Image: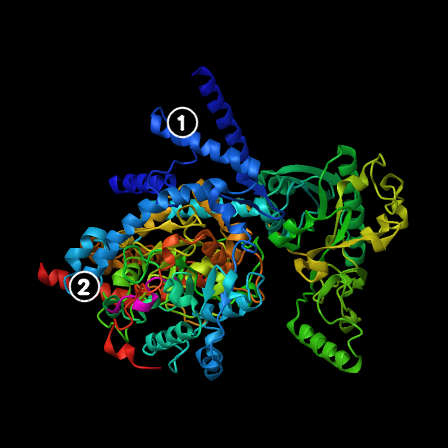
């Protein structure tokens, strides 16, 4: 600690002195007037010189001071020159001579290693705090000047994979370094499942129910989702929320850079979305890839084979069109029902690739550009396929992410089988007591051994040996005895049968050890 | 008495306001900081009009032919001597009339005799220098007029004009006797050392500006490395037992911090060296065989706070750049406590140092760009020379007065080149 304070004080002292080490009597700017007369005198000289320089427009004062001090400086150096003369004559006795003028000695030095040359955890923590502070400063310098709130609109409904999807979205939104308002629109009305996620997120949330139930085909689901998103936008308009609206579909994955990038949107922006057209059937996937390769050979890249959807720019970074995911390889083989084992294809332009300034949705036409349709007059029954229908002029969309070159989020649709059930709230209650047979276990069933003799030995040895396997084995043996009465042979779940296999070896080991004990005793 | 005190207070207030205004100057992208007053502003001085330099026309065997023999001299860290001549030949401070010149420049490339590895051999340099001086002394009267006191030479080698790479031998030789009165522009700087004479101008070693510019990464990349260093810790070829190389300081760094996660130190030569420096907060600049190193230049360009571990080192342009405020100085004996020292620096101090480093005039002063740009190292050298003007009356010798001993020094140096 002493060292620490010594370092700090010496460091601060060094800061206080000026860089002109030749000039020991110089003042530090003369702003702290000390009561001694000499310092006041120097202060006066400095003021006078500054005034003269102001008048003359020429750095007069420093030349004067330099010449004043140059004489004293030359005296200093002549003495050291004299020392260096001595050095030239007697190179071997450097150590004694240089100790007066310089503490640096030429020659072999020891390698200083402190007694315990390992990191100190307190210092490591402090270093991390310094790193954090520096990075915070960097962010404030190069990042967004005045960050706006992020308004995430998520359509969802209760199903097996909802927990998987919503957890991902929830965690992504919780990590966003800006204010977040999460609008969750749920098909089939509000439910406890969704409410628990929304509540866990510790974000500002708006959870509303939507009257329709989610249909069973992808086509219809898209339509209902669009309607739900419009509902969410309506909420933004009614509550007059201010910020950047993005569409966080519950099965998508967002990168953190996405949230940083959308802060740059002025009115209406588009980002590139990675399309993960997942199919449940691996063979199908391979076939579609081959087909795609065939098509690439036939046509000369008129269709993009990248799984990306987003804005397309020309060389001067102006929006000229849209990249659309190439669905031809999947023609006829895409999923229709939600639980089909086939590739789920996106529509032409997914909602999630667009972000908008929430002021577009507001009532008053404050500074809204004319190429935006009035949201309040939107006719839903016409069908709102993509957010571009909110605009009069789709060419005014701003391409984000270095003009669509960065893929900032990924689109994925994966759902469980239609008949899959999941425990409500994912809490198993009452506890499971039915063990389903694991068919085709690779190890043979172990017949239950009569445990009488060995049980006594076990109880003796438990005090001496610190082996827990005998206890388990004991338990299992008891269970085995209980179950032996049942007609059905107890083929346990894989976990338990593993344990079953082991005791055959350990019993022999334990018994040998106990024998050993007994022999000793 | 009262009136005087009021006047003083009034003047003090004015000074306060003026200095605080100049203390911060917000630039477009990052608020940088300038040390107000004499220090930081001096970097922006324009030497044009303040001095005149006459460049001697030496036969090309002293400069061009040597360069032709080995073009590697253009890219190694001693290339400053070559670029200095090129800059002066086309600079507005050059004058073709030696009568009106304040300073005389002798373009002799003493550091261009390279081994196959690229390291310069200094053995012929004293003779070369001596021969050049004999030439100018016999062909022009200006050397004899002042015995070289208004001449300047660029000697960027390890120990300057001592012309040896081994420190003990360099100290033994001392500065070339003929250069005793001249001004030396050198990279070596250590207080109270034989090879740094009074009035020398310390310059940074040459670092290729284009190469560094091409490795810049966006400023928003977060600095996630605490301490960064790449280089040798033990010079196994020349000092296998350790203790000689870097006075044991680099070995101490390795032994104490090789398992410390905060210290990203190794002997590798990664291709992302420059990019990594931009992702680090502190960059170690320990001494090697000589106290200076291009790491200082690289650290300043990439905004990494230099941690200078070299006792009594004199840093480049020390009278114009406030190194104490910009870098962290650690004594060689304190190297085992480097982690304590660095982690106990308050965050405001670190941020201030980074702001000072971000000052573009700071970065410009460390570079030797071609073509020369205002505020770069060439101009700082000229500023330094201008600050030494006007010459003292005593540099002009009376006719017949001789101060230099032309036969001093080792016998081998007296042989013709």
| Within-10-Å neighbours for mark 1: few <14, some 14–19, many 20+ | some
Q: Are marks 1 and 2 on the same chain?
A: yes
The residue under label 2 is: A513
Q: Is residue B263 left or right of residue B238?
A: right
On the image, the x and y values in percent for residue A54 come to 55, 36
**Residue A117 image offset from top left, x and y in percent:** 26, 55
State the extent of the magenta-drawn residues as a range.
B173-183
Query: Disc 2 is attached to a residue of which chain?
Result: A
Q: Nearer the viewer, mark 1 or mark 2?
A: 1
* A466 magenta-colored: no
- Of callouts 1 and 2, which one flags the residue occurring earlier in the amino acid sequence? 1
State the residue position of label 1.
Answer: A33
Q: Are marks 1 and 2 in contact (CB under 8 Å)?
A: no
Assign the C terminus of chain A to one quadrant of the image: bottom left
Q: Is residue A346 visible?
A: yes
Residue at the spot 62% in from the left edge and 53% down from the top edge: A257
Residue, x 59% and y 41% (percent of image)? Answer: A201
Q: Quadrant of residue A291?
A: bottom right
The reply to whether residue A108 is visible in this rendering is no
Q: Is residue A222 above or below residue B164?
A: above
Q: Residue furthest top?
A: B2
Q: Quarter of the image containing the N terminus of chain A?
A: top left
* In the image: residue B193, left or right of residue A463: right
- Magenta-drawn stretch contains B182: yes
């Amino acid at each position: 600690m002493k060292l620490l304070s010594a370092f700090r004080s010496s460091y601060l002292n060094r800061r206080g002195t000026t860089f002109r080490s030749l000039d020991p009597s110089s003042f530090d700017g003369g702003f702290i007037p000390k009561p001694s007369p000499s310092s006041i005198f120097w202060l006066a000289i400095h003021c006078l010189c500054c005034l003269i320089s102001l008048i003359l427009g020429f750095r007069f004062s420093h030349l004067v001071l330099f010449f004043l001090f140059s004489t004293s400086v030359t005296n200093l150096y002549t003495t050291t020159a004299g020392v260096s003369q001595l050095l030239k004559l007697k190179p071997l006795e450097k150590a004694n001579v240089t100790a007066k003028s310089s503490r640096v000695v030429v020659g072999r030095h020891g390698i200083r290693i402190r007694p315990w040359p390992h990191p100190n955890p307190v210092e490591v923590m402090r270093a991390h705090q310094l790193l954090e502070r520096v990075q915070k400063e960097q962010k404030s310098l190069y990042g967004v000047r005045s960050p706006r709130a992020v308004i995430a609109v998520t359509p969802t409904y209760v199903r097996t994979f909802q927990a998987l999807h919503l957890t991902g979205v929830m965690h992504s939104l919780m990590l966003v370094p800006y204010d977040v308002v999460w609008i969750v629109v749920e098909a089939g009305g509000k439910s406890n499942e969704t409410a628990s996620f929304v509540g866990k997120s510790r974000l500002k949330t708006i959870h509303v129910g939507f009257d329709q139930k989610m249909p069973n085909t992808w086509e219809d689901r898209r339509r209902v989702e669009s309607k739900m998103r419009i509902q969410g936008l309506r909420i933004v308009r009614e509550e007059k929320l201010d910020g950047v609206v993005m569409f966080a579909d519950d099965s998508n994955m967002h990168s953190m850079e996405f949230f940083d990038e959308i802060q740059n949107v002025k009115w209406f922006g588009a980002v590139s979305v990675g399309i993960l057209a997942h199919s449940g059937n691996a063979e199908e996937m391979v076939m579609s890839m081959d087909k795609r390769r065939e098509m690439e050979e036939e046509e000369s890249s008129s269709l993009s084979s990248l799984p990306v959807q987003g804005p397309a720019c020309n060389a001067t970074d102006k929006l000229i069109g849209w990249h659309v995911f190439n669905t031809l390889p999947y023609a006829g083989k895409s999923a229709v029902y939600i639980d089909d084992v086939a590739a789920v294809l996106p529509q032409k332009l997914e909602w999630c690739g667009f972000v908008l300034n929430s002021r577009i949705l507001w009532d008053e036409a404050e500074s809204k550009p004319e190429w935006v349709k009035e949201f309040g007059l939107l006719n839903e029954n016409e069908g709102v396929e993509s957010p571009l229908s909110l605009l009069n002029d789709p060419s005014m969309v701003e391409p984000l992410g270095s003009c669509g070159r960065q893929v900032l989020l990924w689109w994925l649709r994966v759902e469980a089988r239609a008949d899959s059930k999941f425990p409500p709230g994912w809490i198993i209650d009452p506890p499971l007591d039915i063990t389903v047979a694991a068919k085709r276990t690779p190890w043979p069933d172990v017949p239950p051994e009569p445990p009488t003799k060995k049980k006594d030995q076990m109880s003796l040895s438990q005090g001496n040996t610190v082996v827990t396997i005998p206890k388990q084995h004991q338990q299992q043996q008891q269970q085995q005895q209980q179950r032996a009465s049942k007609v059905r042979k107890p083929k346990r779940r894989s976990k338990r049968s593993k344990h079953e296999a082991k005791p055959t070896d350990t019993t022999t080991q334990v018994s040998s050890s106990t024998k050993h004990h007994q022999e000793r005793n | 008495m009262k009136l005087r005190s009021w006047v003083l207070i009034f003047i003090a207030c004015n000074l306060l306001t003026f200095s605080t205004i100049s203390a911060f100057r917000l630039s477009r992208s990052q608020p940088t900081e300038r040390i107000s007053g004499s220090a930081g502003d001096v970097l922006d001085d324009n030497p044009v009009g303040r001095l005149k330099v006459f460049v001697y026309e030496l036969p090309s065997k002293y400069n061009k032919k040597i360069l032709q023999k080995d073009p590697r001299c253009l890219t190694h860290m001693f290339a400053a001597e070559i670029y200095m001549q090129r800059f002066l030949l086309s600079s507005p401070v050059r004058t073709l009339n030696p009568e009106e010149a304040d300073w005389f420049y002798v373009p002799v490339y003493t550091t261009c005799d390279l081994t196959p590895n690229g390291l310069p051999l200094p053995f012929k340099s004293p003779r070369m220098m001596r021969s050049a001086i004999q030439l100018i002394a016999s062909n022009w009267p200006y050397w004899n007029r002042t015995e070289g006191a208004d001449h300047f030479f660029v000697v960027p080698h390890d120990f300057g004009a001592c012309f040896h790479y081994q420190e003990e031998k360099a100290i033994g030789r001392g500065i070339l006797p003929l250069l005793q009165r001249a001004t030396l522009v050198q990279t070596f700087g250590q207080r109270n050392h034989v090879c740094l004479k009074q009035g020398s101008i310390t310059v940074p070693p040459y670092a290729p500006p284009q190469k560094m510019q091409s490795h810049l990464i966006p400023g928003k990349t977060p600095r996630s490395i605490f301490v960064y260093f790449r280089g040798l810790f033990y010079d196994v070829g020349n000092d296998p037992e350790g203790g000689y190389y870097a006075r044991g300081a680099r070995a101490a760094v390795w032994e104490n911090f090789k398992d410390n996660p905060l210290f990203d130190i190794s002997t590798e030569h990664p291709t992302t060296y420059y990019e990594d420096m931009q992702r680090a907060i502190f960059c170690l600049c320990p001494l090697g065989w000589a106290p200076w190193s291009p790491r200082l230049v690289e650290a300043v360009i990439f905004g990494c706070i230099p941690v200078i571990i070299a006792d009594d080192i004199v840093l480049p342009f020390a009278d114009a750049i406030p190194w104490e405020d910009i870098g962290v100085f650690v004594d060689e004996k304190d190297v085992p406590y480097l982690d304590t020292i660095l982690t106990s620096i308050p965050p405001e101090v670190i941020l201030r140092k980074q702001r000072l480093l971000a000052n573009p005039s700071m970065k410009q002063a460390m570079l030797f760009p071609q073509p020369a740009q205002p505020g770069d190292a060439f101009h700082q050298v000229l500023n330094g020379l201008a600050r030494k003007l006007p010459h003292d009356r005593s540099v002009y010798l009376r006719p017949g007065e001789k101060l230099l001993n032309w036969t001093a020094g080792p016998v081998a140096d007296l042989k013709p080149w």
